[in-house]
Image (cartoon, grey):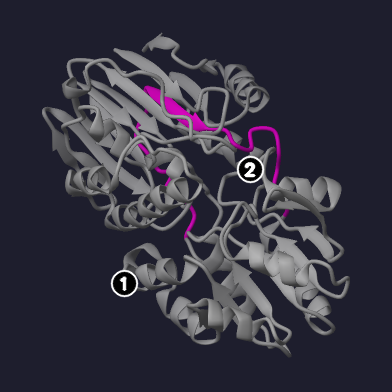
Amino acid sequence: MQLIFHGAAREVGRSCVEVASEKRFLFDAGIKITAEQPEHPTHIDDLRGIAGVFLSHGHLDHCGALPLLDHTGLRCPIFCTSATKAITRILLKDALKIERIKHHHPAYDKNDVFKALDSVQKVRYGQKNYLEGIEFAFQDAGHIPGSASIMVEVEGKRILYTGDINTTQTMLLKGAFVNFPKINTLICESTYGEKDHPERKKEEKAFLSKVKEISDTGSVILPVFAVGRAQEVMMMLAKKDFSVPIYMDGMAKSVTELFEQEPGFIRDVSLLQKSAEKVEFIESRDEREEALKKKGIFLTTSGMLSGGPVIKYLTELGDNPNNGILLTGYQTEDSNGRLLLEEGRVIIDNKLIKINSQVKQFDFSAHAGMRELKELVRKIMPEHAIFVHGDKSATLSMAKFAESLGIKACAPKTDEILEV
């Protein structure tokens, strides 16, 4: 049996692993978001020969290439949870819109999005499923609602693909399921293969304290990812009473409504609903302009300041030292968020703008940290461990750790073929 790594090999982005055995199938089909055009998985031979795609979750770095693959010949079922299908629909349509706004020529059109989604077959956590003699099961990965780690049994061997995984419980989600039977080959993410996260409850307390401090004299901009982070931060804020209103702007509203309709994927859906009742949702430019006339706490996309309503808030509020910008997620190297952290500036309309507001970053990661990843490897103790979805240093570090346990391990390169 061969494993071919078409992306996310010593990098984060364009996750796509091909398994070639009696049948051929894919784990994920994502894109890598860059300042220019998105990067897609490397060439996959004979797409019509792919029996199925196992989709771990709805983030674009895992699902974003599905319409392109459909456009270029993929004709097979795509398996995922119901929440993942709904999230994928929202994010793929939004990605297509953004590409057109940037005047890029997308590699696919809206029809390809709908065709790819028509190929989806929904699966439940813990349920045994079969595809042309391949047995597979999805289990909760704890990353975002609907995310899954996928165990496949083929040729008498078990492969576990973690997808993006978080074993720590959050306000929104339970921690990942980790009680798997004997695994022959583990394909494990390593985003934080060299970094531990702070204790979450302490981080939440520090965050809420900072929001209170700033909102007593100014406004707070909270850039958030629409899927998962927006809802988690909203639930944190709802625990406290602030002297100013809390607003939510951007795509996060439709995602919040989606989660309310998928209660089985949320740790406490009643708490999510009660939290949403304390928030004022902004749905038009006029409402945004009105909200900006007074102090407030503004939850808004995008989480890395790369576009969306957050640009308006930065423009209107970013010059005031009484205001604050609290980043709640990871900022990639080429993002506006990273530029803000390192230089105190952002790019708006191709101009470098100085930000005078207070800036601070909090760690509410939806990925397991180094400690949790190592605990996971120790618990599963596979024969082979393959580390992906992390930079070169993180993946190699995790492979070295697995080898210290007597596990055969590696961090493959793009297009590398492994025999397992």
Looking at the picture, which amino acid does disc 2 mark? Gly
**Which of disc 2 and disc 1 is earlier in sequence?**
1
Badge 2, how many Cα within 10 Å: few under 14, some, many 20+? many
The disc label shown at residue 82, or none: none
> Tag 1's secondary structure?
loop
Main secondary structure found in the magenta portion: loop
Provide the secondary structure element on which disc 2 rests: loop
Assign the C terminus to one quadrant of the image: top left
Judging by the rendered image, the residue that carries numbered circle 1 is 261
Q: Position of residue 415 (x, y in %)?
A: 44, 14
What's the mark number on residue 369?
A: 2
Q: Position of residue 250 (x, y in %)?
A: 51, 68
| Residue located at (49% from left, 81% from top) | 276
68 to the left or right of 299 = left
Tell me, yes or no, whether the highlighted magenta stretch contains residue 25. Answer: no
In the foreground, 180 or 320: 320
Q: Residue 106, percent across and down?
A: 39, 39
- Residue 273 seen anywhere in this rendered image of the structure: yes
Is 316 drawn above or below residue 153 in the view shown? below
Name the foreground residue: 397 vs 289: 289
> As rendered, which of 192 and 57 lies closer to the eye?
57
Please report contact status of discs 1 and 2: CB closer than 8 Å, yes or no.
no
Q: Which residues are magenta?
A: 174-198
